[in-house]
Image (spheres, rainbow, N blue to C red):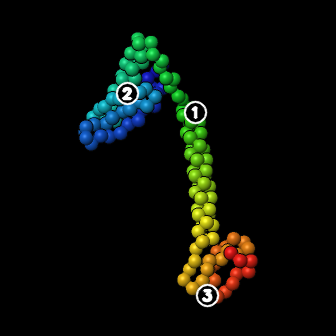
Amino acid sequence: MNPTDYPVFLIYSKEDNAWLARVDLLPGCVAEGATQEEALANSREAIKTWIEVSKELKRSVPKAFDAQELEELQLQANASQGEQIQKLVNETVARIVQQLQASASTAQFTGGELAIGRRGQFYSTPPGLVVAGGR
């Protein structure tokens, strides 16, 4: 496996005053450097060492993804996230409608009552007005 096949995440650490290079596919594989280039070069050495040690310990080595595989995974994650958001919105709207309907059946306003029209819209009635069909 070629160390350049593994994606590397670079971030600057003010605390360490250095660039950190993290290889998410290889747990614990991290390198640092004074520059981005140095951190990236150091990460390639860290990847080689990580793979060698894993093989010596007879542990599995995660397969590196190519650019197309990474893009497909990102698209799947985005689609899944969109579906989860839509489900959450639908559940929240249904819960709010139920709460409004429950409170509408018992709510009273000063001087009038809350009524529900034929199409489900809410409106308040003036004092003394009787809503046809009861509550």
User: For the point 62% across and 86% down, which residue is it?
Assistant: 126
Name the element at disc 2. loop
Provide the residue designation for mark 3.
127
- Label drawn at residue 68: 1
Name the element at disc 1. helix
Q: Which three-letter amino acid code belongs to the residue tagged 2? A: Gly
The mark nearer the N terminus, 1 or 3, is: 1
Which residue is nearer to you in this view: 80 or 112? 112
Residue neighbourhood size for the residue with mark 1, other residues' Cα within 10 Å, grouped as few (<14), some (14–19), many (≥20): few
Provide the residue designation for mark 2.
28
Q: Is residue 46 left or right of residue 2?
A: left
* Disc nearest the viewer among 1 and 3: 3
Position of 125 relative to 50 (above/below): below
Tags 1 and 3 in contact by the CB under 8 Å rule?
Answer: no
Position of 79 relative to 49 (above/below): below
**Residue 29 seen in render:** yes
User: For the point 59% across and 39% down, which residue is it?
Assistant: 76
Position of 27 relative to 114 (above/below): above
Residue neighbourhood size for the residue with mark 3, other residues' Cα within 10 Å, grouped as few (<14), some (14–19), many (≥20): few
- Label drawn at residue 20: none
Q: Is residue 109 left or right of residue 51?
A: right
Distance, label 2 to label 1, CA atoms, is: 25 Å
Q: Quadrant of residue 124?
A: bottom right
Q: Which three-letter amino acid code belongs to the residue tagged 3? A: Pro
Residue neighbourhood size for the residue with mark 2, other residues' Cα within 10 Å, grouped as few (<14), some (14–19), many (≥20): few
Q: Quadrant of residue 12?
A: top left
* Disc nearest the viewer among 2 and 1: 2
State the image coordinates of residue 129 (x, y, percent, origin top left).
67, 86
